[in-house]
Amino acid sequence: MASSNDGMPPAAEASSDTPAVKAELPSNERPSPAPNVPVPAAQPAPRPHDAKRAELLYEKCAEAPAGTLFFQRDLSNMDVAENMGELVNLIQELSDRHMMKLLTFENEACWKIRTRQEAESLRLMTGDERLIYQMIDAEQTRGVWSQSVRARTGQTIGAINKILKGLETKGLVQSVLSVKHPNRRMYLLKHLRPAEDIAGGPWQTDGEFDQALIEVVSKLVEQEIRRQTCIEVPAGYNAYTPEDRVEAIARKKARLQAVQDIEDAPAIKPYRPPRQHGRSNYVYKSSRTYPTPETICEFVTNKNVIKDRTITAEDVDQLLDMMVLEGRLEKVSGLGYRVPLALLERGSYNGFVDAPCGICPVFDICADDGEISARTCVYFGEWLQTESELIL
Amino acid sequence: MSYQQREPPILAKLCSLLVEETYGELAARVFSVLARHGRQTLAGLARESYLTGRQIKPGLVVLIQQHLVFHSALDPRVTYYEIDWQQSYALVRHGKILKMAEDRFGRKAANVLSNMLTFGHTRLADLKEAYFPSPEKPPSDSAEGHLNGTGIASAEVDSVNGSSGKINGNTDALTNGAAFVNGASAKLHTTADLAKKGKGKAAAEQGNDDVDMMDAEVVEEEGDPNKIQSVGDLYEIINRLGKAGWVIKVDPDQYLSPGDFHALVRQQAYDSIWTDEQAPTGTKDHALWDSRTREMKRQVRDEWYQPPKFDTRKRKPTDQDNDRSSKRQRLNGAFAPADCSMNGDTSPHINPVDDDLNLRVNFDKIGVALRTEQMTRFVEGRLGYTTSQVYRTMLCILEEHIPRCYEPWPDPPSDPKDVALNNHVDDKFLVSAREVAHKIGREFDLFDGLDPHEVVLVMGRSEVKQNHHIKPPLDPVSASLDERTRLVSCHIRLLANDPFHFATWHSRGGANAGGGRYCVEFDEIAKATIQLEIENTVAARKGRIGVKLVRALKKNGKLDERQACNVMMTTANDIREIVNEMTVQGFVQTQEIPRVDRREAKLSLHLIWYDRQRAREKLLHDTYKGMVRIVQRLSFEKEKIHELLRKAERSDVVGNETKYLRKEELDALKKWKEVEAMLLLQLFREDDLVSTLRDFIGPLVSV
């Protein structure tokens, strides 16, 4: 049953976004024949073997690929019914047994079959349940809000909630929280995946951002952008050794002074010439092309990390914007992205927060004297490894 | 009230502590009365404190000498005193300033500047007298000199006396004031020393083993030329400092508080436009008045900043000492040729026009140098050491023409469209790769921080082999000027491409520019660095998600919880707590907008927003408070080993510590030195943050 009944006919697949197939109002229990179906004036009573023939019709329909729409001409071409009147009867029969449902496609009546299990469960429902189920079914992936169910059925919210609970426990419908209206619970059939406007884009699952997915994809993207914009220069990339003593002294002296320049703050990580400390170093590539959302989107799609969802450049743009906020990427020259080099490891932030006061939890109640003051401060004591005054 | 004169109570506390630390208790008492009660007359001061007029005056003299206090006698009957907060706060920077002076002008200049910082403004003749006491000194003075220890210090005291006497005419005050000043000098030097010591430590940490052993050699060689040899030498240094704008004339108007200055200039502006019969009417007239006031303020100020005049006619035209790069790293050789001609024999070639000139240190200009250092450090974190040094060279070239970080009295901006269209930048604010290549020391490996492919392209030889190795290796030192220019312009391009836009391409600038001329948009960078420091603070406190929130709000404006979640791609639960805590800390604000008449909370919009100026002021305030705590802790730590320090400072113990002190005492002393170094270094780093937040750009108008 899982994905067999996706709600989209092959004909409509090309323009799958347009809700071309509309379900008839579920309140219309008896399917009214389509306008172009000539309804025989005198309808013969259903005969016993009609049931068999209806079964035959159903079987024939079931042979077609799942989700196929059947128009009147398709059904008559199946050669099950003798004439149009009989066909209408058969269809009526099947509809009564919930094995077929009436839809319209471009203002033409058409039918779709239900699986036997579904039909069975529908048959077991009470009238109200069935009504609500059909309402939910009609909305397909867009889902229906419990309040609008109430508006259309005119029942109390309590009763409706009870029915919806029941349907949910039977495993027929599921509920999701709408992304657009976070406090709305939307109901849709169990096997359907909610549409983007209620469940959000590819980054969201069950109405919440899928942190694991986002993390995986953003790591990939970061690596890729790093690969495209930076190169890792090994420590001895230019192994030139000018060794004479005079110059070494000059260099040493220059370096001493250079260090002093940057040293006012005790640069926690003072400069080390890359050649000496033997560590490779990231530098920006000299080419001035940067990856854009489009290229990254292509990259992510090709990587195939996101299962059964397609992502668009806009989705990637959202992700990249978020990564810029996180400081993992930076935007350069309009639409391009690159990674910051981050040469200094994050061990120090600024003068204020590197001192105990900057991150002190009781900073706001610290005073010149009293119980919490510089004299009695335990954080200063820890930092300087000295004794603070004890609070008596 | 002037933006710079607004002081939160915490700044008053900090400055009082600094004054006490530097100038002793009496000055601090007077200072704190002024800090608590604001603008006061002498009588008012006496009333508000438990001091007598006789006690207050010496304290006040010290403060005035240091320009820590404005005084205005616009009203002839009574003089008002008011604290100059900027100058008072700058006490914490003295060590740093000397360091920068040493880098730019050499050790001798730093020595002169150090005396001027410690003793306040000085008459030129007195300064000369201090360094080269004339033989016909009255005996009493020399006796005092012996008492004080070194010759220079004692003579300096005289000079202090001289000039303060000149301004105040209160001889009674002098000796006292001077005594404080003396005590002060010792302290200041310890801070400066500490700054240097920290430096040395870091240098040692570098772990460069092969050249380390040459250290002693290097130091030894530097020993001698750092002593000021002659009067000419001294004048030359002062001339150089004056030309660079680090030292300016003292003008009585500089003692006017911003409010008094404004009133004075406004009146003058009025008089220059209108007479008594015609009074200004309407908004146009008032706008004219305002703009004339600003113009005149700028005029008066620019007048102060004219470099003091020296008669240099007799100098040899070949002497290029004045044009020497302030940036250039001084190697052993670099000093020798120019300075030999300056020292000794040729010294009398330079003479001040007016020996009575009073000189003071110009903190505006020093702010510019501070900015250069900070931005260099900032770039180093982003783009690497070599690029940062290229940037530093650029900034130092520009520094010469930048008198202050930002204009406090700007004309209102003309139509923004005009500005965008007509982006004319004065030539002196442009710098080209060629100039940088000229100035930057040969010892810099300009290859570092560049794509090896680019290096090879520029050098036109070797090639990049597997794994980005350059084969055969290239010698970075022997590159020709042309090649260096092109390498430098690669670095500048890195700077320009950075999201912070450290440099902005301006024009091609002809063949000599080598890759175009660039300007630096200081204001934009200053804003960005303020933002960055706020983000750093948030990052340290709340981690990545806090920074994300601040950036999201800065980028998108006010957001409600759901929008914020969408932008940040997180769940509401994750941000709720953060928003709450950051609101308490004052970095973000929340707002509730009712949608129904009954103002039901459930139906209201709850917005979160962020204002850079607010966050900036909050962080600045917190930083001041952090500094206060450090200073307080420092004095607490000192108090704990008070006895031992007294013993260690005894003249017979100094130098013989191991002989007279027990082992525990030595250990305690060592521990104290460590603690002091740690606290002071942190204090200086917090001061760096203050300058980023406060000094590089004026108040920001929201977002």
Image (tube, helix red, strand yellow):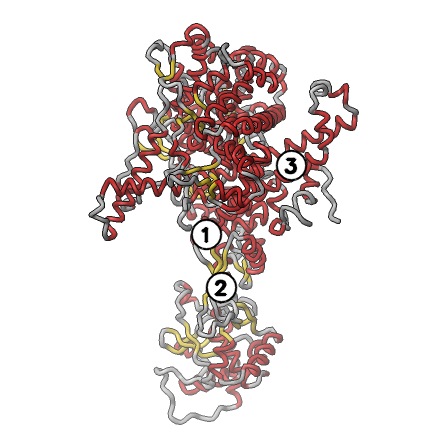
Q: Nearer the viewer, residue A389 or B77?
A: B77
Query: Looking at the picture, do discs 2 and 3 lie on one chain?
Result: yes
Q: Residue at x 58, y 53 (%)?
A: A212
Vertical order, B290 against B151 (above or below): below
Sequence-wise, the earlier of marks 2 and 1 is 2
Residue drawn 51% across and 39% down?
Answer: B690
Residue that carries the numbered disc 3 in the rendered image: B634
Circle 2 marks a residue in which chain? B
Q: Amino acid at mark 1?
A: Asp
Q: Position of residue B65 (x, y in %)?
A: 48, 30
Mark sitting earlier along the chain (2/3): 2
Please state the horizontal and vertical placement of residue A286, each as a whole percent of the image: 43, 32
Question: Which residue is denoted by mark 1 in the rendering?
Answer: B611
Residue closest to the far left:
B277
Query: The residue tagged with tag 2: helix, strand or loop?
Result: strand
For the residues labelled 2 and 1, the Cα–Cα distance comes to: 16 Å
Name the subunit of mark 1. B
Task: Depth check: give the residue in front, A180 or A45.
Answer: A180
Q: CA distance from mark 2 to mark 3?
A: 45 Å
Q: Quadrant of residue B666?
A: top right
Q: Amino acid at mark 3?
A: Leu
